[in-house]
Amino acid sequence: MSQTLQEEYYQALLDKNSEYDGVFYAGITTTGIFCHPTCPARKPKFEHCIFFDTAQAALLAGFRPCKRCRPLSHPNRESEIVQQLVGAVENQPDKKWRSEDVRMLHVDPSTARRQFKKRFGMTFIEYARARRLGLAMEQIKNGKQVIDAQIAAGYESGSGFRDAFERIMGSVPSNSEQQPVLKAAWLDTLLGPMVALASEDKLRLLEFVDRRGLEREIERLRQHTGAIIIPGDNEPLQQIRMELHDYFAGELTHFSTPVAIDGTPMQNDVWEALLRIPFGETRSYSDIALAVGKPPTAARAVAQANGANQLAIIIPCHRVIRSSGDLAGYAGGVARKSWLLQHEKSVAAAN
């Protein structure tokens, strides 16, 4: 491993940069442990670090896994507390949860609040409320009156129910009977968590959760489709969850999850060209420009269409690099792009 790459990894370790989760593991010679890049423990000096491409390599070198960041687990994997409380909500999804209820489960409310905020971007109470409102949405879609759904969701005030519904779901319930619904799911992967949105028949979005501008991307999708977004699961989400697992395990080279591709004509042409790049290979931006009937000078327009891709990994924008061989940018982070390319090259060579 070059000195430059070691310095890059060390800086990522100092920054706790989640884009490098799964890309490398840091062995600490003074303690004999190895960690994820995002480990919250105090950082060692550069000269006390050895960097490994895999957890297995760190183990073989005699390092033991850190008990704080648990590098043998998926990055940002749910804690036991989060798993316990998510399970409790699923057992009573219509329950109006309060701090006292959390204490009765022998969990400190402030700990629950902090861990849910880190994991889902919302507190536990907000998560439970969103789940309740999701159920209310399903009831309305199935013909139940808004007032009945309001009461079932635990709201005495109609305006309070509508405000909460609009803030979380993006639409007031009185208009929801004619609106499409997108289900949202959190997917753990080897390179960190991803968020997926899908209608009942097609996947509409798949992105790493730390992608810059993800919130704006989801909002644009919601406005474009006129859909309401609720936590849940459906066939496309189940399928992509299984296919991502197989992809990262090196057992899948082609995704079959049905997807919706709705960009501009130029974007659609570029995305279709990306899908034709063979697994384990790369193309330059100029190559893609020629593939869609444009001159090589249209490489910048290709790059913009590349960046607008909302189906990471499935539409393989990571397979496009500069003519010089430089990886260029990637919304999920250049370190992830490098890992994905190396992973696909290794799998293709093995097959």
Image (tube, rainbow, N blue to C red):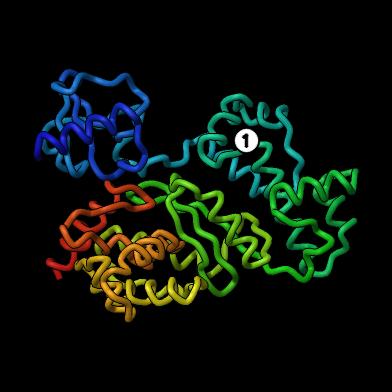
* Residue 170, placed above or below residue 164: below
The residue indicated by pointer 1 is 123
Horizontally, is 52 left or right of 130 in the view? left
Asked if one can make out residue 246 in the rendered structure from this viewpoint, the answer is no
Left or right position of 284 against 117: left
**Residue 35 position in % (x across, y down):** 27, 32
- Residue that appears at 35% across and 62% down: 303
Rendering quarter of residue 114: top right
Q: Can see residue 18? A: yes
Q: In this view, does 5 lie to the left or right of 190?
A: left
Compared across the picture, whether 106 is left or right of 191 comes to: right
Quadrant where the C terminus is found in the figure: bottom left
**46 above or below 86?**
above
* Residue 95, position as x, y percentages in the image: 75, 44
Residue at the (56%, 51%) spot, across then down: 216
Q: In this view, does 45 lie above or below 326?
A: above
Where does residue 55 sit, x and y in percent of width and height?
Answer: 21, 41
Instruction: Please tell me whether mark 1 sits on a helix, a strand or a loop.
Output: loop
Vertical comparison of 43 with 228: above or below: above
Toward which corner of the image does residue 140 lie, by quadrant? Answer: bottom right
Question: What's the amino acid at mark 1?
Answer: Thr
Report the residue at 43% width, 63% height from top.
Answer: 309
Label 1 neighbourhood size at 10 Å, few (<14), some (14-19), many (20+)? many
User: Which part of the image, by quadrant, shows the N terminus?
Assistant: top left
Q: Nearer the viewer, residue 178 or 234?
A: 178
Q: Name the residue rendered at 30%, 60% in the picture.
A: 318
Give x and y (percent) for residue 189: 37, 52
Figure label count: 1
Question: Between 290 and 113, which is closer to the camera in this rendering?
Answer: 290
